[in-house]
Image: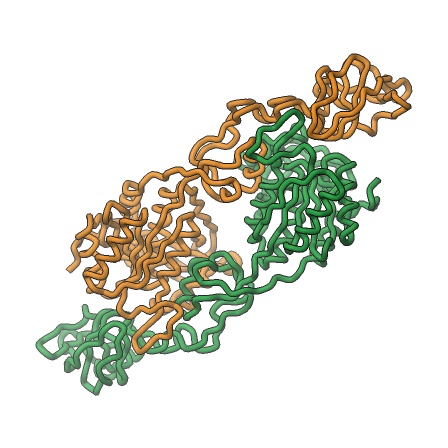
Chain colours: A green, B orange
Amino acid sequence: MSLFLTVVSLDEALGVIRRMAPAPRGEEVPLGEALHRVLARDVKAAEDIPGFARTTVDGYCVRAADTVGAGEAIPAMLRLAGEVRMGREPPRPLRPGEGIAAPTGAMLPGGADAAVMMEHTERVGDEILVKRPVAPGENVILAGEDFSRGAVILAGGRRLSPRDAGVLAAAGFDRVAVYRRPLVGIISTGNELIPAGKTPGPGQVRDANGPMCAAFAAELGCLPRPYGIVRDDRDALDAALARAASECDAVLLSGGSSKDVRDLAASVIAGRGEVLVHGIAIAPGKPTIIAIAGGRPVIGLPGHPASAYIILHALAGPLFSAMSGQPREERRVRALLSENIPSQKGRAEFVRVRLDGDRAIPCFGKSGLLNTFAPSDGMVVVPADREGLEAGETVEVILW
Amino acid sequence: MSLFLTVVSLDEALGVIRRMAPAPRGEEVPLGEALHRVLARDVKAAEDIPGFARTTVDGYCVRAADTVGAGEAIPAMLRLAGEVRMGREPPRPLRPGEGIAAPTGAMLPGGADAAVMMEHTERVGDEILVKRPVAPGENVILAGEDFSRGAVILAGGRRLSPRDAGVLAAAGFDRVAVYRRPLVGIISTGNELIPAGKTPGPGQVRDANGPMCAAFAAELGCLPRPYGIVRDDRDALDAALARAASECDAVLLSGGSSKDVRDLAASVIAGRGEVLVHGIAIAPGKPTIIAIAGGRPVIGLPGHPASAYIILHALAGPLFSAMSGQPREERRVRALLSENIPSQKGRAEFVRVRLDGDRAIPCFGKSGLLNTFAPSDGMVVVPADREGLEAGETVEVILW
């Protein structure tokens, strides 16, 4: 007998997931490990960036006023005051009527407020002929022009891109505060299960859910921690659950295609906490369990990998996204349904589809098979209030 | 003076990249580390999957012939022949007129060819009343029905998803042959550069390109190896390049916003191999270098991070994709240009844009600034044969 006879809607189940998800926590990591991590808070400039005025061209730093009216015919004539070297302080401030040679990126000397490009000058001994005027600020970046002290450089909640890594480095952040990757314990149950590397004896099959759940958690920014295969035995299951819940931030428990085993799992979980949902009005995935055990969120997945994946996508995805702070962009495309999809009113039906151009082809076939699972592109949902979808309908495909 | 005065088109540069890219090489990794890696070859079933016929429902394994004509009124009556336990061989073959209890996923005994669901039966002592007929093969999966021995489970070149991890585990692959992650050496040059964690003195700025290039390489499935900041000095640069080229599969060399430094880099690279391209008819990024040094592909990037990123995207992306075997999906969206983009005929202009609904807003402003770089969403290309794009035009935005 199931512990809970009430079957809830998918929306109710998602509400439970949202309420149970612990808020993400922060940690500091080196910038080199921060790619695709999520900023735990705003990053603000600790100083003006750049810290000094720089030229953006190869040429001469000048006072703009000294170039007024300069042209090809009558160039402005400036005295060469030496050169600024990259990464060094200019030898001295610029006096009126002077120019100083400077490569792109060099520091402007005091007194200079613009730069002229090499191409617009001519050098005659110690004199520079300037053939075009420049305005104050032309060809230079002022101190603090990129980011002034205290300005938000990148906002909290942002998933860091390679571009962000460059900007953070430029602003002096070689470590950043990002959300911690939640540790997800993964337990597979089933007397028939053996690890992928072993040869099955009669009646035995290899555990597909363990590696699939681990990869799914990793894809969503979590750290999977496998607890291996546990026999359908109350004590063994309880011990594994207790350990996983004490060591991890959340637990995925998969297996139990038969009712007896599912009920055993629910009863063991209930003994360590509270089963919040046992039964969702969706197919596949009706016997899904949502619970708190040992203070941690636990999702009990169907035993069949293709069904388990639907629940991973529909429920574990939102849970992990909330816990990791990783924004989850569900990609959707519109397509024409190639065949009728029959469905039972009163439950949402998730049907895997393969995309072929603008057509969505349902992956029907026996429920136990995997051969249409890997090549599928996503799923179509038949809402609970409909009795199926018709060939030729425009449907929204939720891409994996 | 530049070593090469010929400026090539972007297409020509891409042709050079394609020809120089070494083919990806394979390695075996544990399945748990294979997420998002690319299969180096087809994975074929080494045996029939499943290895035996299994039931897909909770109920009884039967001979379909024994249920012909069964109904609510006149059920078929079968003798209970015990039960099949999960992961075990059935106790004995099924004789005509018998049924054997079996949970979902259990092995079918010899003689059985179908299963009836528990809900369609009634148990009376040692007899099973079957109230609905089943056809041969109903509610069971036959041996080899998922994948028959030798069938391609996943094709070479496929980027592994969490679903693939499940299917590979089910098929017995706890290790998989994937393409090696190319090692990319990253060198930043510039006398003005200091690492992100240091405080700049007068004239000094922090190295943004090193961390950005490393993150970019990592995003494309490569392993970045930083060689730090090298002074603009022939011997130092040559030593760093020699070491990176001997230890890595490719090298990114960034820095040199000034012409003198760029020419130094080109000359050092030429000394260790061959400069194939020095100058591309694009803006920004004209002084880009494409070369072979120490037998490895080398890309010399502009010094400014925003310009360097354009070249990473346009040239290092295709190089890394070819070397890592990672399929690279360049995502594009159409948008309405919010402002005119002026451009010079004869070179392709890459303009960063920010998306706002269906509008693409060009990120203009001084070329040395980073503050519009991180928040940009992608770029618009003004083709070499056009003198700009007009506000209101529909443009294609290449998303980062």
Q: Residue at x 24, y 53 (%)?
A: B242
Q: Residue at x 79, y 22 (%)?
A: B100
Q: Is residue A203 visible?
A: yes
Residue B287 locus on image (x, y percent):
25, 57
Q: Nearer the viewer, residue A162 or B273?
A: B273
Q: Nearer the viewer, residue A35 or A29?
A: A29
Left or right of B94, for residue A181:
left
Q: Is residue B392 visible?
A: no
Q: Residue furthest bottom?
A: A96
Residue A60 locus on image (x, y percent):
21, 75
**Which quarter of the figure has residue A301?**
top right
Q: Nearer the viewer, residue B261 or A349?
A: B261
Residue B84 locus on image (x, y percent):
75, 25
In the rendered view, tell whether residue A359 sits above or below residue B206: above
In the rendered view, tell whether residue A323 sits above or below residue A4: below
Left or right of A186, for residue A141:
left
In the rendered view, tell whether residue A260 sits above or below residue A267: above
In the rendered view, tell whether residue A232 sits above or below residue A203: below
Across the whole image, how many numbered discs are drawn on residues?
Answer: 0
**Which quarter of the figure has residue B344?**
bottom left
Q: Residue at x 41, y 40 (%)?
A: B179
Quarter of the image containing the N terminus of chain A? top right
Residue B17 locus on image (x, y percent):
30, 45
Q: Residue at x 50, y 27 (%)?
A: B44
Left or right of B399, for residue B119:
right
